[in-house]
């Protein structure tokens, strides 16, 4: 990945993508990188379309909005239909395996893995799909180290859920391999 990485995390409200964006930003800052995180979601917080965007850079960030993402994550078909074709041609698209991608999609790499099913079937809680997605993103991009990602996750998750979230992060790493 280049000196600056633009990420667009998309899905539906309630999937924790805004938290995922905050965690990735804090992980970058933990490695003395610059980071900007922005978010938007539909009229309903839970169930409506949502998107979080993160820019991580070794240099100053001139513009705080993602304009041409290197990485697009989509956890729902609606999000994929809306955002995957915004990825750069040299970029990475990460989607839940149930998503159908357009034949016109042009990008370097597509990672289609069962993020939501892994959260439900392997970890036992759908709510950790965002943490699994963070693990996939870390493994696919190496934009931040596993150590700072884990520290950022543990700083942000509710007390008593640390082991659950560590397992989710590990599951994400394994899915991306």
Image (cartoon, grey):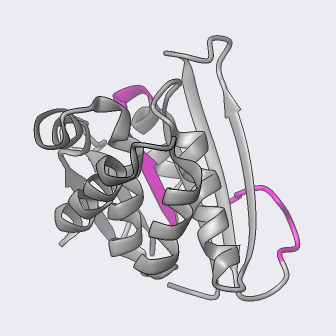
Position of residue 59 relative to residue 120, above or below, is below
Q: Is residue 105 visible?
A: no
Closest to the observer, 105 or 38: 38
What residue is drawn where x is 68% and y is 66%?
A: 55
Numbered disc total: 0
Image quarter of the C terminus: bottom left
Q: Is residue 27 magenta?
A: no
Rendering quarter of residue 120: top left
Which is nearer the eye, 81 or 126? 126
Residue at 65% from the left image edge and 19% from the top image edge: 42
Residue 103 horizontal/vertical position (percent): 26, 47
| Relative side of 98 to 28, left or right | left
Question: Which secondary structure class fits the magenta region best?
Answer: loop
Residue 10's place in the image compared with 135, above or below, is above
State the residue lying farthest toward the front. 160
Give the percent coordinates (x, y) of residue 107.
38, 66
| Residue 156 visible to an observer of this rendering | yes
Residue 26: x %, y % from top left = 66, 65
Image: magenta residue range = 61-78
Q: Is-magenta flag for residue 65?
A: yes
Which residue is outermost to the left? 121
Q: Is residue 161 left or right of residue 120?
A: right
Q: Position of residue 29 (x, y in %)?
A: 70, 75
Give the residue drawn at x 65%, y 64%.
Answer: 25
In which image quadrant can residue 66 be found? bottom right
Q: Is residue 16 left or right of residue 43?
A: left
List the single residue furthest toward the top: 44
Asked whether 27 or 175 is in front, the reply is: 27
Residue at 29% in and 31% down: 126
């Amino acid at each position: 990945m280049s000196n600056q990485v633009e990420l667009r995390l998309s899905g539906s409200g309630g999937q924790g993508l805004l938290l995922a964006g905050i965690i990735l930003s804090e992980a970058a800052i933990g490695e003395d990188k610059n980071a900007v995180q922005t978010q938007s979601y539909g009229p309903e917080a839970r169930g409506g379309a949502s998107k979080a965007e993160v820019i991580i850079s070794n240099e100053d960030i001139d513009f705080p909005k993602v304009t041409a993402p290197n990485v697009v994550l989509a956890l729902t078909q609606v999000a994929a239909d809306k955002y995957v074709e915004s990825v750069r041609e040299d970029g990475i698209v990460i989607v839940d395996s149930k998503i159908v991608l357009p034949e016109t999609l042009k990008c370097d790499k597509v990672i289609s893995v069962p993020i939501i099913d892994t959260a439900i079937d392997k970890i036992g809680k759908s709510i950790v799909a965002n943490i699994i997605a963070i693990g996939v993103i870390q493994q696919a991009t190496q934009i931040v180290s596993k150590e700072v990602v884990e520290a950022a996750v543990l700083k942000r998750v509710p007390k008593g859920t640390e082991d659950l979230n560590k397992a989710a992060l590990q599951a994400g790493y394994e899915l991306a391999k």
